[in-house]
Amino acid sequence: MKKLILKNWRDIKARKAQFGALIILVALGISSYVSFVSAYLNLSASTEYAYEKLKFAHFSTKVISAPKRVVDKIQAIPGVEAVEGRLIIDTGLYISDGEQVKARVISIPPDQHPEVNDLLIEGGSYLKGKAKDVCLLEKHYADEREIELGDTLKPLVDGEKKEVIVEGIVVNPEYFNAVIRKAEIPSPGELAIIFMTQSEVERMFQKSPSYNDISVLLDKGANREEVIEKVEDILDPYLVIETVKREDQPSNFSIQEEIKQNQSMAYTMPFVILFVASISLFIALSRVVQSQRGEIGLAKALGYRNWQVLLHYLLFSLFIAFWGSVIGFALGTYFAKEIVELYTDIMGIPFLKHQLHLELIIGATSMSAIACILAGILPAYASARMRPATAMRADPNIALAKGRVPLIERAVTKILPISLTFRIPIRNVFRARRRSFYTVVGIAFALLLTTSTWAMLDSTNYLLDSMFYEVENWDMVAGFSQNFSHR
Amino acid sequence: MVKPLSKTGITTDNIVVLEGACKNYQMGEILIKALCDVDLEVKRGEFLVVLGPSGSGKTTLLNLLGGIDTPTSGRIIIEGVDISRFSQKRLTLLRREKIGFIFQFFNLIPTLTARENVEFAIELASRDRSPPETDAIALLKMVGLEERSDHFPYQLSGGEQQRVAIARALAKDPVLILGDEPTGTLDFKTGKLVYKAMKELNEIEGKTFVIVTHNAIIGQVADRVIHLHDGQIARQEIIENPISPEEIIW
């Protein structure tokens, strides 16, 4: 077998461009699988880790106004790990004459971090209890507007500009994606999330000591629905507006949608690419077997067994599968890291969990091996089954190919006389039907890959155009910090 | 090249016996009767030449003798064993252990060197022997090509390639060596060299050769000549005084 394996190696070297192209094709399939699945797993892991570290609420209940004592009552419900009462006020932020953006002011406890929906300080420091007219600013807006520590923000209170100084830049799990409505497209420079101490919010917006949002973190294994029911019972006298569960929380919802998209990409694109690779490999290996009929005949005449010949040709597939997996895995891991970094950066997820997944290595190698073996088994089996005398004769497929005139040619020539130059290719297509069929399928899937990528780009453009020029068809919108009667 | 030491002579025992061997091929819609009712005996140590025009069934006969094809009817007995109903697996073992082939187009593996081509066959030999590399070099030396052992087929002349094929045929120490127009693609001078090498192996090593060719002159170097016509043996002749390959002219 040593010399057969040596022959494998020399054959590969002699066809290095062809094998190289096939390896690249398999590597692309594997890398897309590894990168998407790995990105999906790592993005999920990073998000979950960040949520756990920053105590992202399992649900939040919004009320018109509830007294602070409700927090103790809710804390006493079995299954509740922590409760945080907050005042959340949507208002405007003055930028300059003629420009203002949306702002959400959220109250936080002084001196100590919130028990739920914690803040990660990216710059500056947490707010002291007695400090006045200071705030913490969410990172997306700060980055987009290039706001630094010590800068002044001008939130609007009943149309009047107030001034607060930025003491810290923070990341908050509720605003990893800077949106305040579900399915909203984030626009980081258009939404400022401002954190101020509870007393400062009450003072600035002239509110009595109260909360309008109760966020709850649950113990592991707690029954969320039961807890929600009890919380809503406690808050019922204070007019419950809604309870938003973690999966419906706008920022988390959009992140999970992104993760789902990654997941669906991970289980469609690679299979299409690997299918194309399999067809290409099948055609290439069939060609190799055809071109080496004499060598197959010789090996068998000398006394090589069927399984040795089969293994010899299957080794080509395994070679491609192995290197396709190795290169694909390396590329995929690199791309996955880039994708997760890009996502975590855009979304402001502060922790990056990047790890190799054993199941991915096994999955990628198996996929590559299965695709290549399936593609290679037929030509390899055909080679092993050849009788030496048959193998050494001229290829009967060529010698005895049916020379019939295909129907299409007969039909066309009836209407339009065509020259022999055009008839020969038509006949060749119908003479080697299987090869023609696989070529057509291969080209179709290659086009599918190309067009589906373009289609995704077109869909996004179409979506954005529809959103901004048809659905949101206005030039200016006025936002109010509180409801007014339409009369 | 090896020097002739002595003529080993032809023994009386038959190495191959064909009894009423027939072979038909189905080529598309046509049935071709390639060989019809052939009776033949090949003696151990014999240098047998099978002559006949194209399409006379020479190669078919060789394929049957070598176990690379099976007869449609009749029997083929090699060293006393009837192989005509052998399975492909048993035929493979037979070829591996007993038969050496020399083909018209050399059939060397283009991606292996001369030495590796010989080792390609040596690896199949089951008995204990020295490392393949040593044997390959020794065999190439026998055909005068030890200096060219690391050359690839495309770097060798036609005659050299055929001599590598002869070395490969000897690699498994077969009891029977079959040649299918071994000089068919070679020029006169190179062809003579190839026949010289084969004759020496026949006379010195006692190897049995069956050579098929359409070149009647080659019959002069044989111990016996069989004439095939339309898939049947038309006649045979014993060559009482075979001449040296160096003396033949075509």
Image (spheres, coloured by chain):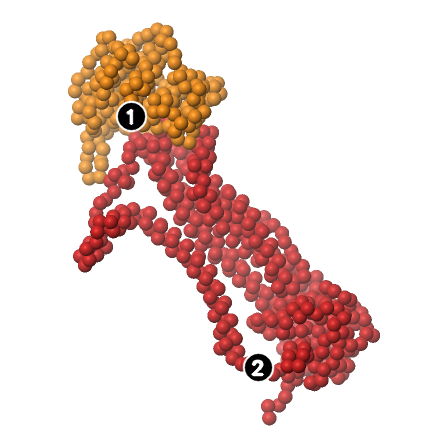
On the rendered image, what quadrant is the N terminus of chain A found in? Answer: top left
Q: Residues within 10 Å of mark 1 (few under 14, many from 20)?
A: some
Viewer-proximal residue among B206 and B215: B215
Look at the picture and state if B14 lies above or below B92. Answer: above
Q: Do the residues indicated by labels 1 and 2 lie within the same chain of the protein?
A: no
Q: Amino acid at mark 2?
A: Met
Specify the subunit that label 1 lies on.
B
The three-letter code of the residue at mark 1 reads Thr
On the question of residue A249 being in view, the answer is no
* Chain letter, colour red in render: A
Visual hue assigned to chain B = orange
SS of the residue at dot 1? loop
**Residue B31, visible in the rendered structure:** yes
Residue at the disc numbered 2: A476
Q: Nearer the viewer, residue B22 or B157?
A: B157
Q: Looking at the picture, how far across and down is residue A234, in whole percent?
A: 70, 78
- Left/right placement of residue A367 relative to residue A287 reads right
- How many residues crowd mark 2 within 10 Å: few (<14), some (14–19), many (20+)? few
Kind of element beneath mark 2: loop
Residue toward you, A320 or B197:
B197
Instruction: Say which residue appears at 56% left-offset and 65% top-offset.
Output: A257
Name the image quarter holding residue B153.
Answer: top left
Q: Residue at x 44, y 60 (%)?
A: A452
Q: Residue A444 location, x and y as percent?
A: 38, 55
Where residue B86 sits in the image (x, y, percent)?
31, 27
Query: Disc 1 marks which residue?
Result: B185
With B195 as the anchor, is B117 left or right in this view?
Answer: right
- Residue B243's place in the image compared with A414, above or below, is above
Q: Residue at x 67, y 67 (%)?
A: A143
Rendering quarter of residue A403: top left
